[in-house]
């Protein structure tokens, strides 16, 4: 039947009893399948992650400056990775780093929500903030 119609016989489900086959133009089928996959891929949102780095004893002016950047990143729809980097013996100021990150999270509450609370990983204390959905 496929040869009479000058089309291809394509096996759709080989594990079924009996196997399911379809008479179609295979090239056209592949083209439409690629087209569907491309459409799905273009609709998928790409998540960008922006980083903001603090020291354990970050000055108030520097903090405000970086907070403005954080607000801009969240408004643009990017995730924010805020971290405090401890150099050398500054690791003894873990509490200050945690207070700094929690203060940032509290001040950015209207722009995004905390995805991961401050957590110490090696010499870094990391916190993630995801943007709030805007309509």
Image (cartoon, helix red, strand yellow):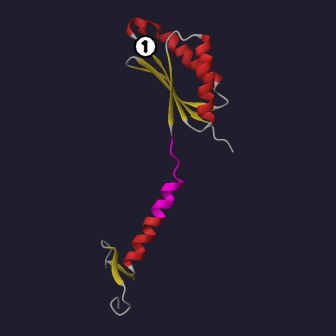
Label 1, residues with CA under 10 Å away: few <14, some 14-19, many ≥20: many
Residue 88 position in % (x across, y down): 38, 8
In the rendered image, the vertical position of residue 44 relative to residue 108, given as above or below: below
Seen at 35% across and 80% down, the residue is: 21
Seen at 65% across and 22% down, the residue is: 107
Which is nearer the eye, 117 or 83? 83
Residue 71 position in % (x across, y down): 63, 29
Q: Is residue 127 left or right of residue 27?
A: right
User: Residue 39 colored magenta?
Assistant: yes
Quarter of image, res 114: top right
Quarter of image, res 60: top right
Q: Quadrant of the C terminus?
A: top right
Provide the residue span drawn in magenta. 36-47
Which is nearer the eye, 20 or 57? 57
In the rendered image, the vertical position of residue 19 relative to residue 98, given as above or below: below
Which is nearer the eye, 19 or 1? 1
Q: Mainly helix, strand or loop, the magenta region?
A: helix
Q: Which residue is mark 1?
A: 86
User: Residue 55 colored magenta?
Assistant: no
Residue 133 position in % (x across, y down): 64, 41
Residue 9 position in % (x across, y down): 33, 82
Q: Quadrant of the N terminus?
A: bottom left
In this figure, what is the number of numbered marks? 1
Secondary structure under the numbered disc 1 in the rendered image = loop
Q: Is residue 29 left or right of residue 70?
A: left
Seen at 30% across and 71% down, the residue is: 15
């Amino acid at each position: 039947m496929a040869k009479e119609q000058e089309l291809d016989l394509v096996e759709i489900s080989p594990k079924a009893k009996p196997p399911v086959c379809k008479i179609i133009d295979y090239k056209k089928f592949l083209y439409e399948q690629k087209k569907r996959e491309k459409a799905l891929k273009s609709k998928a949102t790409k998540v960008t992650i922006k980083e903001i780095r603090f020291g354990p004893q970050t000055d108030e002016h520097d903090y405000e400056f970086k907070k403005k950047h954080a607000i801009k990143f969240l408004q643009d729809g990017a995730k924010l990775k805020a971290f405090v980097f401890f150099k050398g013996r500054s690791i003894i100021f873990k509490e200050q780093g945690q207070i700094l990150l929690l203060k940032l999270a509290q001040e950015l509450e209207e722009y995004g929500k905390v995805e991961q609370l401050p957590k110490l990983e090696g010499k870094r204390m990391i916190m993630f903030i995801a943007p709030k959905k805007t309509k």
